[in-house]
Amino acid sequence: CDLIQPSSLHTLNNRREDGRRIGRLRVLELLGQGTFAQVFGVECVETGERFALKVVKNKQAYARQATIEIDVFRALANCKKRLIELEAYFVYANHLCLLFEWLGPNLYEVLKQRQFRGLPLEIVRCLLKQALEGLQELGNE
């Protein structure tokens, strides 16, 4: 397992009332990859807390786009409704890294586990409701 020691960690989550801090991160698994980045499941060595770590590929255009993403999360930090939480960001080995709260498997992985058969209607309704509430909250900000 690779260990990541973030330097110049910038935290955004003011909801950490328990005072836990983010320290060294242990890479557990690759969760997904795309054109701009790879996402890893990681855990904080000191606390055991799990996170999703988005590691942006080392290209200027991708890093610029990721900084816009960080700005959006900063603007949403005081939303009344809970959206996905960007806990922190930092640079590691010349890659911009965004540390998100752990939410579980992504939709693609769920579909893959189901051998790409559709989801039950009740689950689709729940996912759509969450997406629409998130969009409504974004529109209010």
Image (tube, rainbow, N blue to C red):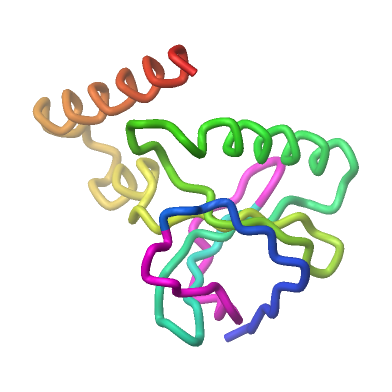
Q: Nearer the viewer, residue 9 or 106?
A: 9
- In magenta, the rendered stretch is 16-37
> Is residue 89 left or right of 103 when viewed as pictured?
right
> Is residue 24 left or right of 108 when viewed as pictured?
right
Q: Nearer the viewer, residue 62 or 101?
A: 101
What quarter of the picture does the N terminus occupy?
Answer: bottom right
In the depicted structure, whether residue 10 falls above or below residue 85: below
In the depicted structure, whether residue 14 falls above or below residue 50: above
In the depicted structure, whether residue 39 falls above or below residue 116: below
Residue at the image point whose x is 9% and y is 29% from the top? 122
Q: Position of residue 46 (x, y in %)?
A: 49, 87
Residue at the image point whose x is 58% and y is 51% from the top? 12
Q: Nearer the viewer, residue 91 or 8?
A: 8
> Is residue 62 left or right of 39 when viewed as pictured?
right
> Is residue 66 left or right of 20 when viewed as pictured?
right
Residue at the image point whose x is 33% and y is 32% from the top? 81
State the residue lying farthest toward the right. Answer: 60
Number of numbered discs? 0
